[in-house]
Image (cartoon, rainbow, N blue to C red):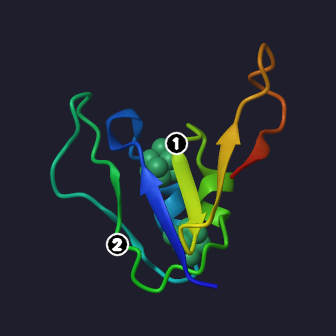
């Protein structure tokens, strides 16, 4: 199933984890820094399968994944438990 991601680039810390983990190599590092001085991840979405590995690995929880624009998931923090495992929240 084809996928698509969106990244909140202004909150990205440029750690590169999503770039490294993407099996389809469809996330790049942007050539320009964001307002905080980090070079953010940039989605190309070329070949994205919607596997969500990028969203799961992102320590900032700022990647959203869509499948065919019908279903969406996002990684959310457990309120008050920043060190707890993150959850995947399904949205309509
Ligand atoms: S959902 Fe999977 S294929 Fe798509 S950008 Fe993220 S890691 Fe890559
Ligand atoms: S894993 Fe998250 S914080 Fe790190 S580069 Fe990717 S989007 Fe930015």
Circle on res. 44: 2
Question: Which residue is at the far top?
Answer: 80
Spot occupied by residue 89 in the image (x, y as percentages of width and height): 75, 45
What secondary structure is marked by label 1? loop
Residues packed near mark 2 inside 10 Å, few (<14), some (14 to 19) or many (20 plus): some
User: Which residue is drawn at the image coordinates 32% and 36% (left, top)?
Assistant: 10
Which of 85/75 is in front? 75
Q: Name the quarter showing ligand 1.
A: bottom right
Circle on res. 62: 1
Name the quadrant of the N terminus: bottom right
Which of 67/26 is in front? 67
| Location of residue 22 by image quarter | bottom right
- The yes-or-no answer for disc 1 within 8 Å of ligand 2 is yes
Above or below for 1 versus 37 = below
Spot occupied by residue 58 in the image (x, y as percentages of width and height): 59, 48
Circle on res. 81: none
- Residue 22 seen in this snapshot: no
Above or below for 63 versus 43 = above
Above or below for 13 versus 79 = below
Above or below for 73 versus 10 = below
User: Which residue is drawn at the image coordinates 72% and 30% (left, top)?
Assistant: 77
User: Which residue is drawn at the image coordinates 51% and 79% (left, top)?
Assistant: 48
| Location of residue 31 by image quarter | bottom left
Spot occupied by residue 79 in the image (x, y as percentages of width and height): 77, 18
Spot occupied by residue 4 in the image (x, y as percentages of width and height): 49, 69
- Residue 42 seen in this snapshot: yes
Could you tell whether 44 is left or right of 91 in the image?
left
Could you tell whether 1 is left or right of 26 in the image?
right
User: Which residue is drawn at the image coordinates 84% and 30% (left, top)?
Assistant: 84
What secondary structure is marked by label 2? loop
């Amino acid at each position: 199933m084809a996928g698509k991601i969106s990244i909140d680039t202004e909150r990205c810390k440029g750690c590169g984890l999503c770039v490294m983990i993407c099996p389809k190599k469809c996330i790049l590092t942007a050539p320009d820094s964001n307002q905080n001085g980090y070079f953010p991840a940039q989605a190309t979405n070329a070949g994205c399968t919607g596997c969500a590995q990028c969203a799961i690995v992102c320590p900032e929880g700022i990647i959203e994944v869509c499948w065919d624009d019908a279903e969406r998931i996002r990684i959310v923090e457990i309120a008050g438990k920043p060190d707890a495992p993150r959850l995947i929240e399904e949205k309509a």
